[in-house]
Image (tube, rainbow, N blue to C red):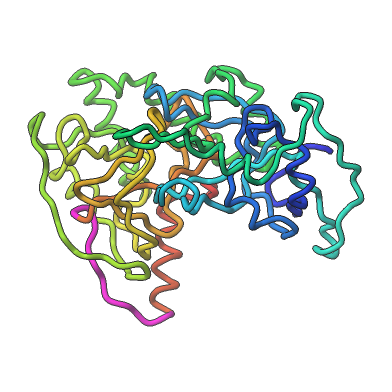
Amino acid sequence: MGKLRAGDWVEVRSKEEILHSLDKSGRLDELPFMPQMFQYCGKQFRVFKRAHKTCDTISGKYLGRRLSNAVHLDLRCDGQAYGGCQAACLIFWKEAWLKPVNQATESSSTCVQFQRPESVNKGSCTEDDVWQGTCAQRQAGSAPRYFCQATELLNFTTPLAWYDFRQYVEDYRSGNATLHRMLRGFIYVAYYYGSLSYRGRSGSPGRWLYDWFQKRWGGIPYPRRKGNLPLGTAGPVANLDLQPGELVRVKPFEAILSTISVNYMNRGMAFDAELVPYCGGTYRVKASVSKFIDEKTGQMRFMKTPAVILEGVHCRSCYSDNRMFCPRSIYSWWREVWLERVSEKPAVDMKRGVENDLRAFSAGRDG
C-alpha cells in the first residue's frame, strides 16, 4: 500500500484481518492495537494527518520521534479500556489496519491483497489477548499499570532530530502542513534564537520588538512569557462548574499571566506557549478532565482541580522548535480561572466571531 496522505479516505479492516496482523501481545511493530479501536472495523474515515512523526511526552524532553506506516484518523481514545482515562488522545493507526477507498464513490474500496507483516510473530492473536494487553496483573494493594499507545510510545518510535530536513519534506508532501504554515514556523524559530528572545533579561529587546511588530498587523504576541506570581505560588482558582456544550471565552494573555508563576505553573498545570494563540477566542466546552493515565508510569492520576477541554482546541506545534508541525494534536488543558462563561449570541454574530478568531490565529495554521 502506498503512503496515505491527509484527506484520503480509508476503511478500517475487519476484526479478523486486524487480529491476523498482531502478535500475541496485540501489537504490530510494538504499536498496541487498543480494544476500543475494534468498534471502527468496517467503517470509513478520512485521514486526519500522516503520523510519520510524533512527540515524546514521556521523558519530559518533548523531542521529536519517528515512526513508519502510520496515520491519524480523526478518532480519539475513549478511555473505556483504561480505567476511564479522560485524556482523549488521538489514536495511531498502522496502514496495515486500513485499506484505501475510492474517492469518487466514497464507498467502494480498492481491492488490496492483505498480507501478514513479516515482523509479526507467528501465532494468532485473539480479542481477549488485546484486552489482556491493556493492563498488568494487579498485585495486592497496588494500583494497576496500564499499557496504551501513549505509555508505549517510546517502544514503537525512534529519535528524530529537529534538523533532519526529510521530516519537513514529508510534512508538506503528506498534506500535514501548508508551505505558508511551515514558513511562519521557521521564521518564528529563527527569530527566537537569532534575537536571543529565549534568554532572560538579555532577551527582552527581542521580545519587545516581536510584540511591537505583531501588534501592528494583528498577530499573536510573544508566546513564551513567565507568569507574574512568585515561584512556589499555587495560583488562584475559579469554580465555574462548566458543562459540555457551554460557551466560554479564553481570557486575554495578559490576564492569564497574573494567574501563573514565573515557571508557567498554576497549581501544577503549565500554561504552554501553544495555548497562547487561543487567548481571546470563544469556544465550546467539550469535557472536563479529572483523571488520566500518567504516560511515564502507566498509573491513573487524579486531579485535585479538574481541567477543561475545549472543542477544536489542541496543540498545533507552532512554537515547539524541537517538534515542529507534530501531527499528534494533543488536547490543550485549561484551568477554569483562564476562562469566562459567555452568553449565547445570534447565529450570525457567532459565525462572525469564529471567523475573526480564525483570522487572528493566522491563515495557514491548519488543524
Q: Residue at x 26, y 37 (%)?
A: 270
In this view, 287 is above or below 224: below
Q: Residue at x 62, y 21 (%)?
A: 165
In this view, 331 is above or below 96: below
Answer whether residue 155 is magenta in the image: no
Q: Which residues are magenta?
A: 337-347
Picture quadrant where residue 259 is located:
top left
Picture quadrant where residue 101 is located:
bottom right
Residue 351 in picture, x, y percent from top left: 45, 72
Q: Is residue 177 visible?
A: no
Picture quadrant where residue 244 is located:
bottom left
253 or 308: which is nearer to us?
308
**In-image side of 248 versus 194 (left or right):** left
Residue 228 in picture, x, y percent from top left: 11, 37
Residue 130 in picture, x, y percent from top left: 61, 41
The residue furthest bottom is 346
